[in-house]
């Protein structure tokens, strides 16, 4: 049986060619468009196929490509019928047909059709002609030419778009795709065309896509303004569907690859979350520092009044030691929130790593440590204490992931900003040093990985971890203008990569106000009046006592307004104002400016449960005399005061 | 319309030629109805598409009057002009009616 398939959307052509060939003894199949043809070709294997070039639902050119890609039809004798051959050259290369016939009066077409079929049989279906038969009877029409150029123009526009465009028919089958749709879906055109759109997606997303299509169709004139987000392979896509007004059955689908956007949004959300936790953590640390100030102050005063042989003396010393531990915790919290002290110096990163790794290695002998350091590593600027702590925290964390044994690889090298662009977004231009710490430990799941930098998040059992180690690593990295990236797989271990800029800009630098212990006891004679401004009653009380112990007369104010009032009344006696920065209503900054308005030479020692960074730094820049961080000891306050008003001779 | 001559020219039996003309009448009639509706709606793009369709079929059968009228409509509609195409629409309608009348007469 010699089967011939005729694919043309005009019934007259189908009728005529099938009658003509039927009369010649061929079995003729007909299809009204490309889609119907694909369905027929799944069941039949015609030796000759006539394809109209311009058709709805998969045009002739695409159909030719599909036929050539179908295993059973690769060797079919393909004849293109074209109504526009006179106006525009047929895309011979794309069609890969065996022969081309221009449409025209049937009596002329019939001659060419029969000739070509004979040629097919004679050549064993292998002949290839590139000349269009029947062209000599036609005259080019300008109007058709223009239209074809317009069509070509639209095709160029569609091909240049980044968004995937698909046309689907009433049954949801794909009848047109542009280049981007092919790229986004990863399906070849031949497979995409005629496929059911919903079936492009994995089972889990099909219902969502189908109900969205349904919703759009039901909405008619007012399709939903939002699209639907789905996954296709490893891509995140947003798809929108627009019904075609002229043809109610059909719709246009817009496919947008939003993988990158989603990743960015995710990172942003995560860093906003860390940022807000940071603010919260700093607030908690601030309040704790106020409480610790009261505890430390009272304990200091009691200790002063006791002999070392007193049975409570050692207990009080223990309280002071615990206050110091608590102070370290609040310091870590402030460090996480990037509100810690920052002393910048040139650092030899390799040296810090060597030393820290050595210390760590002594405590965990069962872990083998490989250190691979770039000897040409750039010297970079940073806070030595914080960086050392950061390295130690990373190593401790890796150690905890390898409770029995394992391998720890530490690597450093120089990298340019362009090398880290793929992992972090928009790194500032310049050189970075990289420290990578890889362990062969238990690894983390995604949920854990997402939260490891949050303060107080810990996977360790109660009492073993504070949940502050990695949080402070994060704070240090951010404080140095760097980036941190973590990669982990359950059972395969974890790698932290930290990129620190060689020159952090601008440095979050603050004056170092270390709380050194004073060597000598305060003098026993009144040194003048201090105005103590703090909204916390307990802080005023204990600080007042400390000041009196330091031989100052004390005026205390619980608000900015009261402070200004007292200052006006006692200006001549006041040698120093000790001013809390964070107060309700009138804050320390405003009080400072008003005090300066009353007396430009006023000496102000700022204090806060927050660190020097930010407001305190700014006020020091504007003439404040110094800063002391809560909690402070009697001696450290004494030292700060001496620095400002001079120690008593 | 000389069906016998048409059959000879196209290498068909008379019956086949008759069926072919019948198909032409049916499809063109349908296209023309849609064209008239699109004309009433002043939908130039739709008018152009339908005129193009009618022209193709008419030229297959070398029905010159209908081919030329459809071509004229197509060209005007392409320039977004529908006014003044009424005579051509009428010409297609009358051409089609007369072919139909001939076919009916044969029955």
Image (tube, coloured by chain):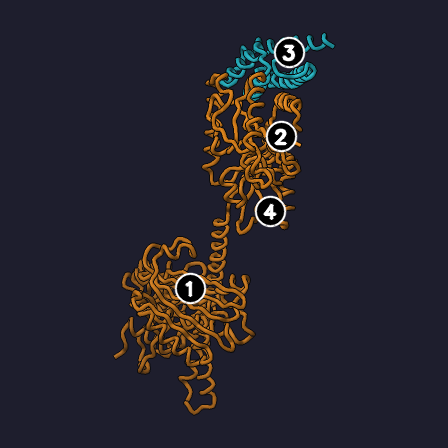
Residue A497's disc number: 1
Measured along the vertical axis of the image, is residue A272 above or below residue A546? above
Select label 4 or label 1 by which is in front: 4
**In the image, residue A410 lies at what x, y percent?**
40, 70
Q: Secondary structure at mark 4?
A: loop
Alpha-carbon span between mark 2 and mark 3: 30 Å
Chain shaded orange: A
Residue B96's disc number: 3
Select label 2 or label 4 by which is in front: 2
Q: Residues within 10 Å of mark 4 (few under 14, many from 20)?
A: some
Residue A201's disc number: 4
Locate the C terminus of chain B and report the quarter of the image it occupies. Answer: top right
Question: Is residue A520 something that shows in the picture?
Answer: yes
Q: Chain of mark 2?
A: A
Query: How many numbered marks appear?
Result: 4
Q: Secondary structure at mark 1?
A: strand
Relative horizontal placement of residue A150, taking residue A66 as reference (left or right): left
Chain shaded cyan: B
Q: Quadrant of residue A324?
A: bottom left
Alpha-carbon span between mark 1 and mark 3: 80 Å
Residue A5's disc number: 2
Q: Residues within 10 Å of mark 2 (few under 14, many from 20)?
A: many
């Amino acid at each position: 049986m010699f089967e011939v398939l005729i694919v043309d959307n005009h019934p007259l052509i189908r009728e005529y060619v099938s009658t003509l060939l039927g009369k010649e003894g061929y079995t003729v199949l007909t299809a009204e468009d490309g889609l119907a043809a694909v369905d027929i070709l799944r069941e039949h294997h015609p030796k000759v196929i006539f394809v109209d070039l311009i058709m709805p639902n998969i045009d002739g050119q695409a159909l030719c490509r599909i036929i050539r890609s179908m295993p059973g039809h690769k060797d079919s004798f393909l004849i293109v019928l074209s109504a526009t051959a006179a106006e525009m050259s047929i895309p011979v290369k794309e069609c890969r047909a065996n022969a081309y016939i221009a449409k025209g009066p049937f009596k002329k077409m019939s001659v060419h059709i029969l000739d070509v079929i004979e040629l097919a049989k004679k050549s064993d279906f292998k002949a290839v002609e590139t000349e269009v038969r029947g062209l000599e009877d036609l005259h080019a029409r300008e109007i058709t030419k223009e239209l074809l150029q317009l069509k070509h123009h639209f095709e160029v526009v569609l091909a240049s778009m980044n968004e995937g465009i698909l046309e689907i028919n009433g049954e949801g089958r794909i009848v047109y795709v542009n280049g981007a749709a092919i790229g986004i879906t990863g399906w070849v055109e031949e497979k995409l065309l005629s496929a059911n759109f919903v079936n492009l997606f994995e089972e889990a997303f099909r219902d969502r896509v189908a109900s969205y299509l349904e919703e759009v169709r039901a909405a008619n004139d007012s399709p939903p303004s939002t699209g639907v987000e789905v996954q296709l392979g490893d891509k995140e896509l947003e798809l929108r569907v627009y019904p075609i007004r002229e043809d109610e059955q059909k719709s246009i689908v817009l496919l947008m690859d939003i993988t990158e956007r989603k990743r960015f949004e995710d990172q942003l959300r995560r860093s906003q979350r860390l940022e807000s936790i940071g603010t919260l953590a700093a607030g908690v640390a601030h309040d704790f520092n106020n409480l610790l100030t009261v505890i430390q102050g009272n304990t200091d005063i009691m200790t002063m009044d006791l002999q070392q042989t007193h049975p409570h003396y050692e207990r009080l010393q223990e309280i002071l030691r615990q206050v110091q531990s608590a102070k370290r915790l609040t310091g870590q919290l402030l460090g996480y929130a990037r509100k810690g002290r920052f002393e910048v110096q040139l650092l030899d990163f390799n040296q810090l790593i060597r030393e820290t790794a050595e210390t760590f290695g002594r405590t965990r002998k069962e872990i083998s440590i490989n250190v691979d350091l770039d000897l040409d590593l750039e010297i970079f600027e940073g806070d030595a204490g914080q960086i050392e702590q950061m390295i130690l925290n990373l190593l401790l964390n890796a150690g905890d992931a390898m409770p029995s044994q394992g391998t720890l690889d530490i690597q450093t090298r120089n990298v340019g900003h362009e090398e880290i662009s793929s992992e972090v977004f928009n790194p500032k231009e310049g050189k970075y040093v990289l420290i990578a710490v890889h362990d062969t430990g238990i690894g983390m799941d995604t949920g854990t990985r997402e939260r490891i930098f949050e303060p107080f998040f810990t996977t360790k059992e109660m009492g073993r971890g504070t949940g502050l180690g990695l949080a402070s690593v994060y704070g240090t990295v951010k404080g140095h203008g760097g980036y941190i990236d973590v990669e982990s797989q359950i059972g395969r271990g974890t790698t932290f990569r930290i990129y620190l800029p060689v020159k952090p800009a601008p440095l979050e630098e603050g004056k170092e106000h270390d709380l050194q212990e004073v060597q000598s006891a305060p003098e026993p004679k009144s040194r003048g009046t201090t105005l103590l401004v703090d909204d916390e009653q307990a802080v005023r009380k204990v600080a007042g006592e400390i000041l009196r112990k330091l031989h100052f007369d004390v005026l205390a104010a619980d608000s900015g307004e009261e402070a200004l009032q007292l200052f006006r009344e006692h200006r001549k006696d006041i040698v120093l104002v000790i001013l809390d920065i964070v107060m309700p209503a009138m804050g320390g900054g405003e009080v400072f400016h008003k005090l300066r308005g009353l007396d430009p030479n006023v000496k102000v020692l700022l204090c806060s449960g927050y660190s020097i960074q930010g407001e305190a730094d700014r006020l020091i820049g504007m003439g404040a005399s110094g800063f002391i961080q809560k909690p402070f000891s009697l001696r450290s306050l004494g030292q700060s005061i001496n620095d400002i008003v001079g120690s008593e001779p | 319309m000389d069906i016998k001559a048409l059959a000879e020219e196209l290498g068909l039996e008379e019956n086949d030629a008759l069926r072919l003309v019948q198909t032409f009448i049916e499809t063109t009639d349908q296209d023309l109805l849609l064209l008239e509706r699109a004309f009433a709606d002043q939908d130039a793009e739709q008018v152009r598409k339908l005129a193009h369709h009618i022209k193709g079929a008419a030229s297959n059968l070398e029905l010159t009057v209908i081919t030329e009228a459809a071509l004229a409509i197509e060209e005007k509609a392409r320039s977004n002009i529908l006014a003044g195409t009424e005579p051509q629409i009428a010409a297609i309608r009358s051409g089609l009616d007369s072919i139909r009348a001939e076919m009916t007469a044969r029955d």
